[in-house]
């Protein structure tokens, strides 16, 4: 089943951003992106050195090889700079199909110069469109630290429904809390909701619509 969703060949391209298969070739540009302004990375692990970024990317590539994730580098099309990462994860099969029935979108971070631009909205549109319209998933999940109110508000504006708070669910990425558990806000979009959610995302990409911060 992992070959059906190969992380090596899947590229998703919009008007503002291209999501391309993550590779070690992206490490240098990712380090540059990660160090533009680190004040926004309280909730998400974003390596700041070449060594740490190499380990981060290598770990994701190992998970991709095992079929656990599909990781992307986010390339801003206006200047062709790599400005962050995102991925599919928690890929689940429960109806016997060769394609996923459920997937999560997460692990998202962007350089400061790419935040509050159309890039994050369009990346979510690309990921969700592929998941629902190519893979035919029944459910797409988005999780965030329950304390991250900005992220939760942004996820709600995408059109996802908050399902609740999962207590002691996943590890905290906050400095001083590494190795500790966190409470996680769970959100989802299901297949019957996707047409309305897609329409909302397309409206937000119109020039008159405000942009949103990164919601992970």
Image: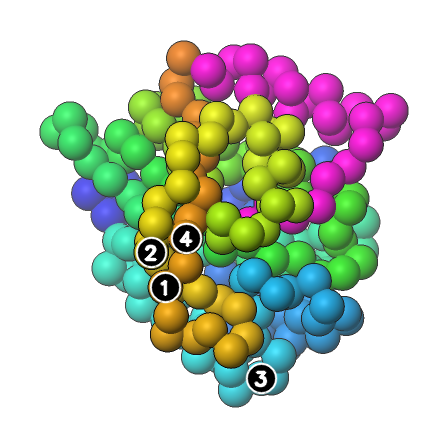
Label 4 with label 2: CB-CB less than 8 Å? yes
Q: Which mark is residue 50?
A: 3
Q: CA distance from mark 3 to mark 1?
A: 27 Å
119 vs 87, left or right, is right
* Label 4 sits on residue: 183
Which span is picked out in magenta?
Answer: 193-216
Q: Which mark is residue 168?
A: 2
How far from the left and from the top, in percent, is residue 134? 40, 27
At horizontal 52% and vertical 13% (from top left) the residue drawn is 195
Crowding at mark 2 (Cα within 10 Å: few <14, some 14-19, many 20+) = few
* Label located before the other in sequence (4 or 2): 2
Residue 86: in sight, yes or no?
no
Residue 207: which quarter of the image?
top right
Q: CA distance from mark 4 to mark 2?
A: 5 Å
At horizontal 46% and vertical 15% (from top left) the residue drawn is 193
Label 3 with label 1: CB-CB less than 8 Å? no
Q: Which mark is residue 181?
A: 1
Label 4 with label 1: CB-CB less than 8 Å? yes
At horizontal 72% and vertical 68% (from top left) the residue drawn is 39
* Label located before the other in sequence (4 or 3): 3
Q: CA distance from mark 4 to mark 3?
A: 31 Å
Vertical arrangement, residue 14 with respect to residue 38, above or below: above
Callout 3: helix, strand or loop?
A: helix
Residue 30: which quarter of the image?
bottom right
* Label located before the other in sequence (2 or 3): 3
* Label located before the other in sequence (3 or 1): 3
């Amino acid at each position: 089943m992992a070959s059906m969703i190969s992380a090596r060949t899947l590229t998703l391209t919009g008007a503002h951003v291209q999501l391309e298969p993550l590779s070690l070739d992206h490490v240098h540009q990712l380090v540059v992106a990660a160090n533009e302004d680190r004040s926004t990375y309280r909730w998400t692990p974003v390596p700041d050195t070449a060594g740490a970024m190499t380990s981060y990317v290598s770990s994701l590539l190992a998970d991709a090889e095992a079929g656990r994730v599909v990781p992307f580098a986010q390339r801003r099309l206006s200047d062709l700079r790599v400005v962050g990462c995102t991925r599919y994860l928690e890929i689940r099969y429960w109806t016997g199909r060769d394609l996923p029935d459920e997937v999560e979108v997460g692990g998202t971070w962007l350089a400061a110069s790419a935040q509050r631009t159309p890039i994050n909205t369009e990346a979510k549109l690309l990921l969700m469109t592929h998941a629902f319209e190519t893979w035919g998933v029944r459910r797409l999940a988005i999780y965030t630290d329950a304390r991250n109110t900005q992220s939760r508000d942004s996820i709600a504006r995408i059109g996802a429904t908050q399902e609740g708070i999962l207590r002691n669910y996943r590890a905290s990425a906050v400095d001083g809390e590494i190795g500790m558990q966190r409470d996680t806000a769970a959100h989802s979009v299901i297949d019957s909701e996707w047409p309305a959610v897609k329409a909302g995302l397309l409206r937000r990409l119109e020039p008159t619509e405000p942009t949103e911060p990164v919601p992970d």
